[in-house]
């Protein structure tokens, strides 16, 4: 190793304590919480910060609309939703960026009898305050719902944010907090100790970065990153395609959601509509037919949107774990390697709680939630 690189690596060893791999909302938020609490952090991304799944998301904080049964995952989602407002208020202050938090709920409607039965089956564990609403009751909330809407549930506390703006705010806050961020970072080699139980850092093309603890938060790419550690984490990319339209006048005031389709009103008057679920590897190509397919359900949901102006379409790769829950915690057999990945359809919602729990682990503090159900080795 040339002298200059050697000197730099020694310097960084004394400076950098926490190395975060992955600059989506999950990696950025972990870096943010750690930096706020005084840890020195370096964050690496193979591309640019916030440019993968995190920029594709519709931004729903759907703790209830996205949960199909009671249990630890539902509790995790609710805990994150409860944190959101305060957490993003502080993020907005530190970053100077708005993330467009909108505190109106989600109207989850049934278009078919089967969907109605499934939805009604969820009511007992949602608890008080969440009731079945008839079609007439829903029309008082959203008067333009289509004729096929049978009824549904109004989730008043499932709010939303602007997902790309959340990434931008995190990026700006990391700059403010002095986190070193390296984009287009290509990890050439992991630096491991002889016992193969301790990560010492990474070798990039032009720099060695030493770390005392490392977090893998690389979304859909986490599986391949963990292979060198003999960890075969079941996380697969699931492509989602969304599109945006602009109606001539406001059509809805809440997010409207049904099986396989949602319409999310944004502050600028546009509507984000999604999304497909495609298991086609790391292919991110746009399918022109996907918009037409989703639009068929949208017309049943909100017929007035047939006249809205199409603006653009995009895709992203959701990091889907085999059981739909994220992996949060220390990697088995490694004493300073951590994983926060596999947030699938709910990574925006789960950002604050993931950041809080992971930073507690990295700081050696107790966590507010039992992490056993999310253990990294639960499916190995
Ligand atoms: C269409 C769509 C709609 C969605 N809607 C919602 C929603 O409404 N609400 C919600 O809560 N969630 C939603 N999601 C899910 C949410 O977007 C994800 O769960 C979340 O963004 C995952 O964040 P992440 O940081 O784990 O992954 P990503 O945002 O994908 O970030 C991973 C990062 O790791 C980097 N990386 C990969 N490999 C390496 C490497 N070798 N070295 C360094 N860096 C690497 C990548 O470049 C990337 O920047 C949606 C997703 C999609 C696709």
Image (cartoon, rainbow, N blue to C red):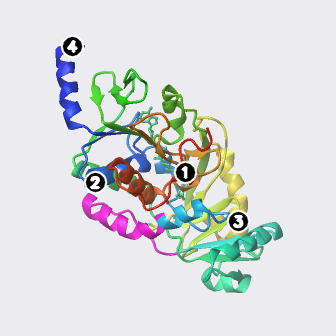
Whether residue 98 appears in magenta in the rendering, the answer is yes
Q: Is residue 378 left or right of residue 219?
A: right
Q: Mark 2 = which residue? A: 173
The first of marks 3 and 2 along the sequence is: 2
Measured Cα–Cα span from mark 3 to mark 1: 39 Å
Give the camera-side residue of 308 and 142. Answer: 142
SS at badge 1 = helix
Callout count: 4
Ligand 1 within 8 angstroms of badge 3 C-beta? no
Disc sitting over residue 374 in the figure: 1
- Kindly indicate whether the residue at mark 1 contacts the one at mark 3 (C-beta within 8 angstroms): no
- Kindly indicate whether the residue at mark 2 contacts the one at mark 1 (C-beta within 8 angstroms): no
Ligand 1 within 8 angstroms of badge 4 C-beta? no
The first of marks 4 and 3 along the sequence is: 4
> Between tags 1 and 4, which lies in front?
1
Q: Residue 235 location, x and y as percent? A: 59, 40
Give the camera-side residue of 109 and 174. Answer: 174
Q: Residue 334 location, x and y as percent? A: 44, 34
Q: Mark 4 = which residue? A: 2
Image: magenta residue range = 80-104
Disc sitting over residue 99 in the figure: none
Measured Cα–Cα span from mark 2 to mark 4: 35 Å
Disc sitting over residue 299 in the figure: 3
The first of marks 1 and 2 along the sequence is: 2
* Residue drawn at x 48%, y 39% as measured from the top left: 331
SS at badge 2 = helix
**Residue 95: quadrant of the picture:** bottom left
Give the camera-side residue of 162 and 351. Answer: 351
- Kindly indicate whether the residue at mark 4 contacts the one at mark 2 (C-beta within 8 angstroms): no
């Amino acid at each position: 190793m040339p002298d200059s690189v050697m000197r730099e690596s020694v310097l960084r060893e004394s400076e950098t304590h926490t190395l975060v791999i992955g600059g989506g909302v999950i990696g950025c938020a972990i870096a943010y919480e750690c930096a706020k609490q005084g840890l020195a952090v370096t964050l690496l991304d193979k591309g640019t910060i916030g440019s993968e799944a995190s920029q594709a998301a519709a931004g729903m904080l759907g703790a209830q609309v996205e949960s199909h049964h009671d249990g630890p995952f539902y509790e995790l989602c609710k805990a994150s939703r409860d944190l959101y407002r305060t957490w993003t208020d502080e993020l907005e202050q530190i970053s100077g960026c708005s993330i467009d938090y909108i505190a109106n709920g989600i109207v989850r409607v049934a278009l078919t009898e089967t969907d109605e039965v499934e939805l009604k089956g969820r009511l007992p564990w949602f608890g008080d305050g969440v009731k079945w609403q008839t079609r007439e009751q829903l029309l008082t909330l959203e008067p333009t719902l289509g004729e096929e809407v049978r009824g549904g549930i109004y989730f008043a506390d499932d709010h939303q944010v602007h997902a790309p703006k959340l990434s931008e705010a995190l990026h700006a806050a990391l700059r403010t907090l002095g986190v070193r961020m390296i984009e287009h970072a290509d990890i050439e080699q992991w630096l491991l100790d002889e016992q193969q139980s301790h990560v010492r850092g990474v070798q990039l093309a032009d720099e060695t970065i030493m770390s005392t603890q490392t977090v893998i938060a690389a979304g859909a790419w986490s599986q391949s990153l963990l292979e060198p550690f003999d960890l075969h984490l079941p996380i697969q990319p699931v492509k989602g395609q969304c599109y945006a339209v602009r109606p001539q006048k406001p059509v809805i005031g809440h997010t409207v959601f049904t099986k396989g389709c949602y319409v999310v009103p944004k502050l600028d008057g546009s509507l984000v509509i999604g999304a497909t679920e495609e298991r086609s590897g790391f292919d991110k190509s746009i399918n022109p037919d996907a918009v037409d397919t989703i639009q068929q359900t949208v017309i049943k949901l909100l017929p007035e949107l047939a006249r809205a102006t199409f603006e653009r379409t995009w895709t992203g790769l959701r990091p889907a774990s085999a059981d739909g829950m994220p992996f949060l915690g220390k990697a088995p057999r490694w004493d300073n390697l951590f994983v926060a990945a596999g947030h699938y359809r709910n990574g925006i919602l789960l950002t604050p709680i993931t950041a809080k729990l992971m930073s507690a682990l990295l700081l050696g503090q107790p966590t507010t939630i039992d992490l056993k159900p999310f253990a990294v080795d639960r499916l190995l």
